[in-house]
Amino acid sequence: MVYETGNRTIDDAVRRVLDGERLDRRDGLALIAQPVEDLAAAADYVRSQFGDGTVDACSIVNAKAGNCAEDCGFCAQSAHFDTGIDDYGFLDPEEILEAAKRAERDGAQRFGIVVAEKGVSKEQRPDEWDDVVRAIRLVRDETDVEVDASLGILTEEEAEILADEGLNHYNHNVETSPNYFPEIVDTHSFEDRVHTLEVAREAGMDLCAGVILGMGESPTDRVDAAVALQDVGVSSLPVNILNPVAGTPLAEDLGGSADITTEEIVETIAVYRLLHPEARVRLTGGREVNLDADEQHLPFEAGADGMLTGDYLTTEGQSPGDDIEIVERAGLEPNTEANDFDPEAVKERTADDAAVDTAAGTATEVQTDD
Ligand code: SF4
């Protein structure tokens, strides 16, 4: 079947994507100017052709919180800003395992160990490094979830050790476009981030890298970030929407709310699907605060096929049962490939106990990730 919306720009792009062609920056800029309804329908179709009709859920633990020397303008965990969050050193690996088990129970297919740090360092903090490796081994050996980590900048040696220990995926977001990045971060560069992704890829890990929308970037920046990620080669593309935390520069600059509309969120997700037809386009932090309850399914009708479930690193998410209902409302179903869980049981349990304890366990937030 040939897909047609009657919009020539979109139809031509879909045809080329289905032919295996990679769309470029010019395509992305032309697409993001098209009507959102047409874009969403086309992206949904492309998802149906490349994907398996499932939405993949990941969950992460804030394994080392706060006091980070970097100055990312969105981040509650930077030592440069007074945000009042609790900081703590690397958790006991057994606690991380418990968090992974809760994530597994709640339907996550992938579990990420996240530290607030420019980079874990085998050389400078060997005891912490040993704990990181131990935590990876525990999650690898004692759960069915895939192991992910967001540990900041890596050396080649560190990346090889992590890959050998069974770390399947490495997360290191680029946050925004190369041009806009210096508006957000002074203490390291966009190129530093890309270099770490290349080191992780060379070591054999799949890459999870994405963006934060609503930080004051333009639609062109949104396209440019996705094009940069094409060059990097990501299998998972997390899309956060800024949830401004009081005390961070972006919260002050933007007056406490993200600079993006629902329509822009949906059109960006759709364009990302078309530029990355084979990646999991994953809706992550900030979705609950930037989309109304009856809008949350819209990105999943516009090409998204992944999500972060549970709480975020420093802010709360919604219940895993609610997340499953959003997926189902979009006509999709939860992925059960790595972790064969019962979605009905998760919905029932989390409805019975709306205050399910995710605060200490599946704590997840990508707006402080690395
Ligand atoms: S995003 Fe990561 S590197 Fe940047 S300040 Fe937060 S914890 Fe540090």
Image (spheres, helix red, strand yellow):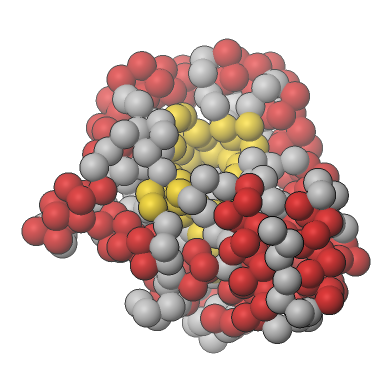
Q: Please indicate whether residue 281 sits to the left or right of residue 233 in the image.
A: left
- Name the residue: 45% across, 30% down: 146
Between 217 and 302, the residue placed more toward the observer is 302
Residue 150's place in the image compared with 130, above or below, is below
Q: Position of residue 313 (x, y in %)?
A: 41, 53
Q: Based on the displayed image, in which of its 4 quarters is residue 193 positioned?
A: top right
- Name the residue: 24% across, 42% down: 342
Q: Which quadrant holds the N terminus?
A: bottom right
Q: Position of residue 286 (x, y in %)?
A: 47, 67
Residue 182's place in the image compared with 101, above or below, is below
Q: Please indicate whether residue 198 sits to the left or right of residue 168 in the image.
A: right
Count of numbered circles on the image: 0
- Name the residue: 57% across, 20% down: 162
Q: Please indicate whether residue 183 sits to the left or right of residue 145 in the image.
A: right
Q: Residue furthest left?
A: 352
- Work out whether residue 89 can be spotted: no
- Name the residue: 69% across, 42% down: 234
Q: Please indicate whether residue 349 sits to the left or right of residue 307 in the image.
A: left
- Work out whether residue 256 can be spotted: yes
Q: Position of residue 317 (x, y in %)?
A: 34, 61
Q: Residue furthest right?
A: 26
Between 289 and 264, the residue placed more toward the observer is 264
